[in-house]
Amino acid sequence: MLSRKENVVMTAVYELCDGSECCLISRSDILALLPKRVSLTADALDDTMYALHLDGYFDMVTSERKGERMYVITLKENGFAFRRTRLQKRRDITFKIALAFIGAVATFIFGLILRGIFGQ
């Protein structure tokens, strides 16, 4: 399970790779795609990228180009499945909410039936 920051960074990496297996990404590219509510420093971004690398989402090689740190990313199986996994989790949560709502409605109706039978 990814943390919130890892999830946001992986989303940015996935969008920047745009379906290709290998891509070259700069720190500023990733930081530009992050939402305003998530504030990451360059060092925190390095740590998060390294954690995602260790978790098996992608292979990563860092390099310097014109004084800026660049990441050479090669998506692995977990990286390609990231979008599908995220959609599946969203569907599971939606299903659980719908099931809870149906349970609440059924309980309300059952209560009305019992009140009608035993009258008050």
Image (cartoon, grey):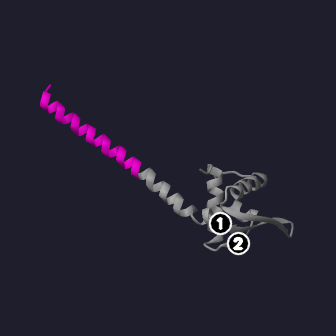
Say if 119 sits above or below 41 in the image. above
Q: Tag 2 or tag 1, which sits nearer the N-term?
A: 2
**For residue 44, side relative to residue 34 (left or right):** right
Residue 76, numbered label? 1
Q: Which residue shows up at 49% across the image and 60% down it?
A: 87
Q: Where residue 40 appears, x then y in whole percent? A: 72, 52
- Where is residue 90? Give x, y as percent: 48, 55
> What amino acid is at disc 2?
Cys
Against 8, is 120 above or below? above
Q: Residues within 10 Å of mark 2 (few under 14, many from 20)?
A: some
Where does the C terminus fall, quadrant-wise?
top left
Camera-near label (1 vs 2) is: 1
Answer few, some or many: residues within 10 Å of disc 1's Cα (few below 14, many 20 plus, some between 14 and 19): some
Q: Amino acid at mark 1?
A: Lys
Q: What x and y, as percent, mark residue 13? A: 66, 64
Dominant secondary structure (helix, strand or loop) of the stretch shown in magenta: helix
- Residue lying at 26% horizontally and 42% vertically, measured from the top left: 106
Q: Residue at x 31, y 46 (%)?
A: 102
- Element class at badge 1: loop
Of the pair 40 and 14, the residue shown nearer to us? 14
Dot label at residue 23: 2
Q: Nearer the viewer, residue 52 or 42?
A: 52
Which region shows up in magenta? Answer: 95-120
